[in-house]
Amino acid sequence: MRAGVKPSRRLGLDLASVRLVLAIAEHRSLRRTATAIGMSEAALSHRLRALEDALTVSLFHRSSIGVEPTKAGAAFFEEAREALRVLDLAVINAAATSRGTAGKLTLGLTTSLSAGRLRTALSAYAEEHPEVDLQFVEGDRFRMVEGISSRAIDIAVLHGAPDDKLGEPLLLWHERLHVLIAQDHPLSGCSEVQWSDLEEETLLVAAQSVAAEAVKLLAGRMGRHGRRPVTRSHSISRETVLSMVGMGLGLTLMIESALGSLPQGVVAIPLAGGDQALVPLTAYRDPSNDHPPLRRFWSFLKRGYVDAARVAAACDTDRRALAKARSEAMNRASIGATSLAGSVGVPVSRASTSA
């Protein structure tokens, strides 16, 4: 065999001929096979002999009542059936991947999937597209953005308003902040916790959690009075910080997605404050990433999991801001034109001046 030349190519094999001889092996007769596939018996016999010549083996024992596989033929048919099965499956999988109905989709997360709309969305997508292999990566914002850029991550869901610098954004929805406290804490009986209630508390901030963003909001409120919140930052998991809360070592803040399966002795109370207690969740992708499962999942989110009312409100706010900016620019231009016109004096004759 020449180096680098595959046996099938060297022997002049073609898939159509292989499928024909498998049909002959199934029907055990050239005549019955020719009738079943709509080919003349002579043409079928010619294709069989050509394949046997290429293989340099006899695949069938021929008789007046039909054909029977030889030992070499039986071995060839068994391997050929498996090879064609694998090839057919590869073709099906390739087509499914190109449509986005199969393949691998890698999601980056900075929030928990213990509860909430993100868990619901992913469960619904997995049920709708069971052929797609969902892979998950956890980490901080830097790791998510780096993963999107390198395409190690197809799509990341991050806390915070859309930011074009992080990738192509898709504002999904908002989730209310909740205060996680021990069951015997004085605030545990409240229906809501006020921001001011947190000013004297120790706030536990875990890596990758939304608590860090909430602390920034609290710091802004307290900074007006020259004060700062008391925080303890730890490189720990959600489960560990909840255990610390249960031990009475402090409070923490989480959004609704993280409130599933709370440990005994820990309660979640909504944080008051209207929109200031709502945290936006935004999905990001690399706009040049044309991975079919990503395209399909992005459309899936846009179709059923985008807070349309808030997106429309945000667009209205942007439009009003743009209109205001244009109006101000036009006013400045108008004032400038008026000033310029006023500075151009009307010539006055010497005669009229002397008079």
Image (cartoon, rainbow, N blue to C red):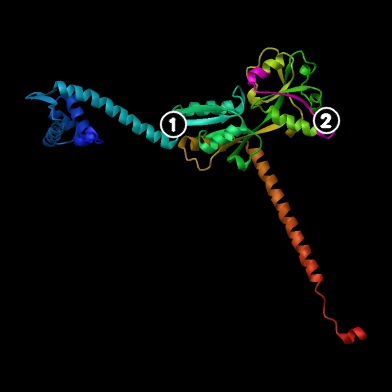
- What mark, if any, has residue 103 been given in the picture? 1
Image quarter of residue 176:
top right
Q: Residue at x 79, y 63 (%)?
A: 335
Label whose residue precedes the other's in the sequence (2 or 1): 1
| Picture coordinates of residue 283, whole percent (x, y) | 59, 35
- Is 347 located above or below residue 247 in the figure? below
| Region of the chain picked out in magenta, as a range | 223-241
Tell me the crowding category of disc 2: few under 14, some 14 to 19, or many 20 or more residues within 10 angstroms, Cα based. Answer: few
* Element on which disc 2 rests: loop
Who is closer to the viewer here, 66 or 111? 111
* Element on which disc 1 rests: strand
Residue located beneath label 2 in the image:
227
Q: Residue furthest bottom?
A: 351
Image quarter of residue 71:
top left
- Is 16 located above or below residue 262 in the figure? below
| Picture coordinates of residue 342, whole percent (x, y) | 82, 70
Q: Residue at x 50, y 27 (%)?
A: 135
Q: Is residue 30 left or right of residue 106?
A: left
